[in-house]
Amino acid sequence: MQRTNTLVVGQGIAGTLVAFMLHQQGVPFIVIDTVDENTASRVAAGMFTPISGKRKTIQPLVLQQISYAVKTYQEIEQLLGISFLHLQNIHYVYNSLSEKDELVTKSIQPESSKYIVTNVESIPGIKEEMGACEINHSGWVDCGAMINGFARWLQQNNALIESVFEYEKLLITNETMQYNGIEFSNIIFCEGYRAIHNPFFSKENIIACKGDVLTVAYYQPITNKIIKKNGIYLVPFGDNLFRAGSTYQWNNDTALPDEASKKLIENKLDYMLEKGYSTIAHRAAIRPTTKDREGIAKQHPQYAGMFMLNGLGTKGVLQGPWRAAHLVQLCLAADNKYTSS
C-alpha cells in the first residue's frame, strides 16, 4: 500500500494551484489526471483584469487577488524554470460613445482611477474610430505551458498518475481513505466540468459554459498588449500569432468547435482589424461555472478529509490562487499530521 497525505483529482488550473500550494506547505501528495488537451484550462486565453463584465465592475478584493495571483505564478515559474506569466495592459477599444463616456467617467472616480488610463496612443492595424483606454494591473497566463510544465515536474517527482478517476473505487474509513493501492488522509477534487459526475458533491450546481477560441495570424499590429473590442480579445503569444475569442454558450456541454461560433468571432475581428488575417486553429472547451459566478472551495459536510475546488469559470486565472490557498488551509486544519509516502 502506497501512502501519502493528499490525493488531488484533476490537474487543470485548479489542480495545479492546489498541488503547488501543498508542495509549498511540505504536504506529500499525488495527482490523478486524464491529461486531456481540450480542457477549459488548456484552451483558455488565461487573461486577468481588475475590470470585468458588461457593467465593468471592480470587485473589492480584486487588487489583493491580482497581487497574490502574480506572486503565486512567479513562484511556480521559479519552481519549474519556465516563463508563462505575461504582465501586459489591456488596450480597450471603445465600441460606442456610451462605452467611452462610461470608462472616461470611471477613470476619474477614486475607486477605479488607478486601473484606467485614458488618452492612450492608437495601435496600428486596429480600428479605433472612437479611441481607446488601457486597463492596467492586467495580463495573461499561458495556462497550457504552466499545466504541462507542472505535469513534467510531477512526473519527475513520481507524483502524477495519468488515469481516469473511478469514484466507485474510493474506499472511505473512519481514519483514512484508499484508492487503487494508495492510502491517504485527504482528497481534493479539482475536476472542472467533469465534477457533474461526482457523487460526493452532487448538490453543487456546476453550469456548463462552452467557449470557442481561434488562433489567428495578423501581421499589422506591433504590440505586446492585449487588445479588446466589442466583447472579444486578441492575446499576442509570439510570431504574429494571437488567440481570439471567446464565445459564451451557457448550458452547452458539447466541447466540439462549431462553425457558428467561429463565424461570430471572425465577424467581430473584421470589425476590429483594419487588414486581413488568417485563422490558423479553432478550439473549444467547457468552462465550469456557477449560478452566482463564484467558485466553489469547500469541505464535504460528512467526510472531513474531502474537499472540492471548482466553478472558477472565466475568472480562474485571477481567483484561482486566492481560492486554492483558502482550500489548502481548510485541508491543513482538517489534518495536520502528515506521513511521507
Image: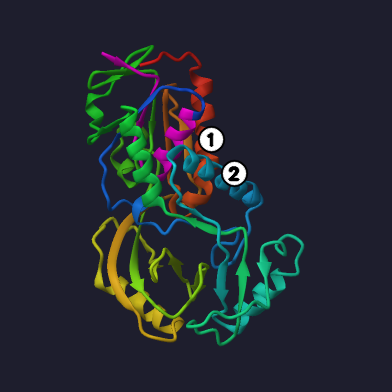
Residue drawn where x is 45% and y is 51% of the image: 84
Instruction: Tell me residue 162's x, y (percent).
Output: 24, 35
Check if mark 2's residue and mark 1's residue have beta carbons within 8 Å. yes
Residue drawn where x is 62% and y is 79% of the image: 121
Instruction: Tell me residue 210's x, y (percent).
Output: 34, 59
Name the image quarter holding residue 50: bottom right
Segment colored magenta = 1-23
Dot 2 or dot 1: first in sequence order is 2
- What count of labels does the image hold? 2
Name the image quarter holding residue 265: bottom left
Amino acid type, callout 1: Ala
Q: Secondary structure at mark 1?
A: helix
Q: Is residue 64 above or below residue 7?
A: below
Residue drawn where x is 30% and y is 60% of the image: 284
Instruction: Tell me residue 34's x, y (percent).
Output: 25, 40
Of residues 114 and 242, the one drawn nearer to the viewer in this rendering: 242
Task: Give the label on residue 68, or none.
Answer: 2
Q: Answer with left or right where residue 74 lies relative to residue 196.
A: right
Task: Give the label on residue 325, or none.
Answer: 1
For marks 2 and 1, give the CA distance: 10 Å
Q: Is residue 17 magenta?
A: yes
Assess disc 1: are there few (<14), some (14-19) or many (≥20) residues with their C-alpha within 10 Å of its C-alpha: some
Amino acid type, callout 2: Tyr
Q: Secondary structure at mark 2?
A: helix
Residue drawn where x is 60% and y is 47% of the image: 65
Q: Is residue 222 above or below residue 275?
A: above
